[in-house]
Image: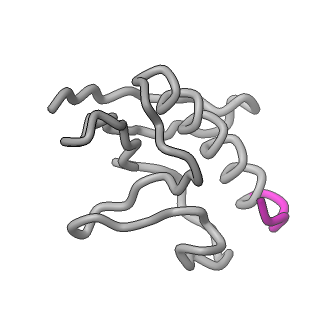
Amino acid sequence: MQIAAIFYRTKDGLADYYFSFEQLADGNWRAFILSQPSYGGRSESLHDTHRLRDGGRYYVCWTAPLSTFHDAQQVAAIWADSTQDYIRTGNSF
């Protein structure tokens, strides 16, 4: 299992997210969320925040398998920017 931990600063420059990218036994990748800003009173439901859980850890929910580390990084960035917008405006994504 390959693991890499990376910080991502959102496009608006206002928040940092920290991810652990882990390769699973089937070869696909998962972006675990190590830290992120508070939802600030917004719903924190897994559905609303596009997160899933594995062993008590949250990871980014994505419909297709993430077959490369690069794919996982791109999806984590999209998720972080979308989450930042959700926190700021309440708009779902």
Q: Position of residue 37 (x, y in %)?
A: 53, 54
User: Is residue 30 left or right of 73 when viewed as pictured?
Assistant: left
Q: Position of residue 90 (x, y in %)?
A: 81, 67
* Residue 36: in magenta span: no
Outermost residue, top side: 70
Seen at 71% across and 60% down, the residue is: 87
Seen at 64% across and 79% down, the residue is: 43
* Residue 92: in magenta span: yes
The number of numbered badges drawn on the structure is 0
User: Is residue 38 left or right of 24 when viewed as pictured?
Assistant: right
Q: Position of residue 50 (x, y in %)?
A: 59, 62
Relative to 15, residue 93 above or below: below
> How is the model colour-coded?
one colour
Seen at 77% across and 51% down, the residue is: 85
Quadrant of the frame with the C terminus: bottom right
Depth check, front residue: 32 or 87: 32
Relative to 50, residue 26 above or below: above
Depth check, front residue: 76 or 30: 30
Magenta range is 88-93
Quadrant of the frame with the N terminus: top left
